[in-house]
Amino acid sequence: MTETSTLPTVDRAGPRQTRPRRLVAELIAGRTGHFTAADLAADAQGRGLPLGRATIFRTLELLLGGGALERIDLPDGSHAYVECAPSHHHHAVCSRCGSVVDFDDAELAAVVRAVARRTGFRIDSHRLELFGLCPACQAGERSAG
Ligand SMILES: [Zn+2]
Ligand SMILES: [Zn+2]
Ligand SMILES: [Zn+2]
């Protein structure tokens, strides 16, 4: 008996899939605010991790499908990802530093109901992203004069 490892058995579903996924999850954890596949590729390169951009992109799409990530459409037409709770919510996104704050439907539910009444639509889903300057960036702007 030479087997002394006490580690649990590696995920049988796909050890080859698990590693890039874990590495990408680590890269995401090291970020604040939203990020792109290119951002993560640069992080991976900086840390000497063996992760190509295609692998990162595939992994991001997987995480997106699993509800751990959401895609944000930025005002300039580009896309970014943000780590997210799977429950329905919205984002306020800082246009300068990219920080993201979640908010829920509290006030919005009434707006959606009013629009449904006015248009006769049965509203099944909606998306809302708000863009502006976060408190920290506003403070920076004021102190910069
Ligand atoms: Zn979110
Ligand atoms: Zn900001
Ligand atoms: Zn909503």
Image: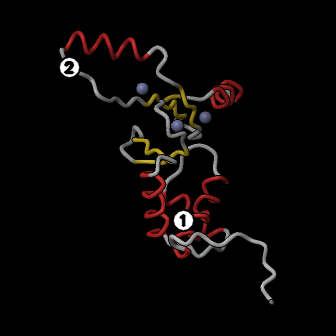
Image label count? 2
* Mark 1 neighbour class, 10 Å CA radius: few under 14, some 14 to 19, many 20 or more: many
Determine the image quadrant of residue 140. Answer: top right
Helix, strand or loop at disc 1?
helix
Residue at 52 percent across and 45 percent down: it is: 82
- Name the spot of residue 15 as percent of width and height, x first: 56, 74
Residue at 42 percent across and 40 percent down: it is: 74
**Residue at mark 2:** 121
Callout 1, which amino acid? Ala
Q: Nearer the viewer, residue 97 or 79?
A: 79
Q: Nearer the viewer, residue 40 or 140?
A: 40
Q: Is residue 112 above or below residue 42?
A: above
Q: Is residue 81 above or below residue 26?
A: above
Q: CA distance from mark 1 to mark 2?
A: 43 Å
Image quadrant occupied by the N terminus: bottom right
Left or right relative to 82: residue 74 = left
Q: Which numbered dot is residue 110?
A: none
- Name the spot of residue 19 as percent of width and height, x first: 59, 71
Callout 2, which amino acid? Phe
**Residue at mark 1:** 41
Residue at 59 percent across and 38 percent down: it is: 99
- Name the spot of residue 127 as percent of width and height, x first: 37, 31
- Name the spot of residue 41 as percent of width and height, x first: 54, 65
